[in-house]
Amino acid sequence: MAAFPPHPSSSLHPPRFQGTDVLLAQMNILDFIAQNANHSTMFLFKCRGWAPLWLLTGVLSLQFVDLSAASAWNRFRGPNGTGVLESSVKLSQLSMEDLAWKLELPGEGHSSPVLWGQTLFLTSMNPQASSFYVVAIDTLSGKVNWSREVAYEAFSKHDFNSFASPSPTVDETGVYIAWARPESLHLASLTHQGQWRWDRDLGPYQSQHGVGVSPILYQGKVIMANDQLGKSSLIALDKANGSLIWQTPRNSDKAAYSTPCLYQAEGEAGQLIFNSAADGITGVDPSNGQVIWSYPKAFDKRSCSSPIVAGGKIFGSCGSGGGGNYVVALNPPNASSANKVELAYEIRRSANYVPTPLALGDIVYFWSDGGILTAADPKTGRIHYQERVGGRYFGSPVATGGEILCVSTTGELVVVEAGPTFKTPHRLDLGALCHATPALSEEALYVRTAWTLHKFHQP
């Protein structure tokens, strides 16, 4: 096990940095290249084989996202939180012979790995040493590039949670992390080399179950939902120096652990989508934090899963340890609906609570905490099947190559083939506690159990 030297101080004094964001706005690919011809990075677009650029100029629904974010698994559940990335990994053929390396982590945690180039970032917590770690790992060798330590104080949380549950996010400039102490919620940034850039104290954090929401990057901002029992808000910080750009007050109820995604209707500006028990499902203007629309009666329980967009619908779910979980599908506002949000349908049977849904093709999949997989038509809610895959799940499914993977709380990798008909799953058991969502690259799968990181690569 590698040594993890402590950072000399938890008081961070950031240098000034200026990053250049490359935004993929509402334009075609050729326009983007023409407007960024002096940029030093060459971007290649892969569509099931290499396609000439002119074929891509008609691509629709480009989601108004950072191009850097679209080219890497750089946030919780990858590009826009979809959980989907094209990779050479054949999930249904995974075996322990594909294990490229295994790394023991300092302490434990449930945050999911994020990737940038050849580096993987995650967080961990050692309760005995009262230390919170940020770790950068070389993906080829499995060796630790660097680790940084923050003095930490444990506090009350749910037994299923950890003190290192929020996943980092990363871009070409730095890595961004969130953690909480009893008296404060923190959002901070480091360089790719491990130097601290800035640390923002967001004030007290109150929750029965601990902290778990993850930040995202968008248009030069680090954005995070701070939905808690105490003073709640949505927050956007300048990614370069951590200064506050906007803060939107929220109602307070049960703490929410939902990480936002981006939604953009054709011909309209992008919106940030947030879920919480207190405010339901909300569309927010990313430039200033103003609420565009809200469906406050969406949930009557805690929201842990994150929103996704599929079939023109926005999905969210809520639930509790005692049951009563359900999924909500909304028709977002548009000109034809007089700019009013409408409930499309609900799924009340065997719904997910903690795992986030996944959309692939023209089917949306709901992997429930209790091990029941539901496949449905996202436009109508018609159920294709509901089948028991077994196990218990707190991590969310990911997909590549028409196959869907979710890891159980006991570390069993369960793979099902996408489609309207259920087929017998492929299984690979790691035999270790796992509440984290896996990460995909173009050529590898990374599975984080509570104390260990695994890389799977198929030659």
Image (tube, rainbow, N blue to C red):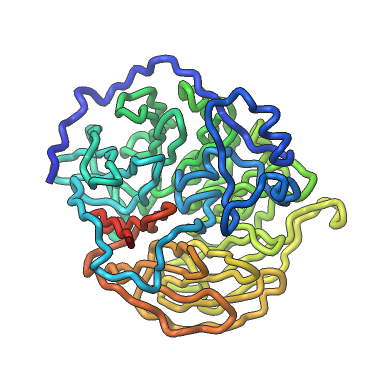
Q: Decide which of 252, 353 is in the foreground and name it.
A: 353
Q: Residue at x 25, y 61 (%)?
A: 99
Residue 58 position, x and y percent, is 75, 49
Residue 386 position, x and y percent, is 53, 83
Q: Residue at x 54, y 56 (%)?
A: 82
Residue found at the far top of this picture? 16
Please give left or right for residue 335 compared with residue 108 in the image: right
Please give left or right for residue 215 compared with residue 12 in the image: right
The quadrant in which residue 309 appears is bottom right
Residue 135 position, x and y percent, is 27, 39
Please give left or right for residue 84 compared with residue 146 in the image: right
Residue 198 position, x and y percent, is 39, 23
Q: State whether residue 173 is above or below residue 444.
A: above
Q: Is residue 303 visible?
A: no
Q: Residue at x 15, y 32 (%)?
A: 5
Q: Is residue 210 visible?
A: yes
Q: Decide which of 28, 293 is in the foreground and name it.
A: 28
Q: Residue at x 33, y 70 (%)?
A: 94
The quadrant in which residue 314 appears is bottom right
Q: Decide which of 7, 98 is in the foreground and name it.
A: 98
Q: State whether residue 158 is above or below residue 64.
A: below
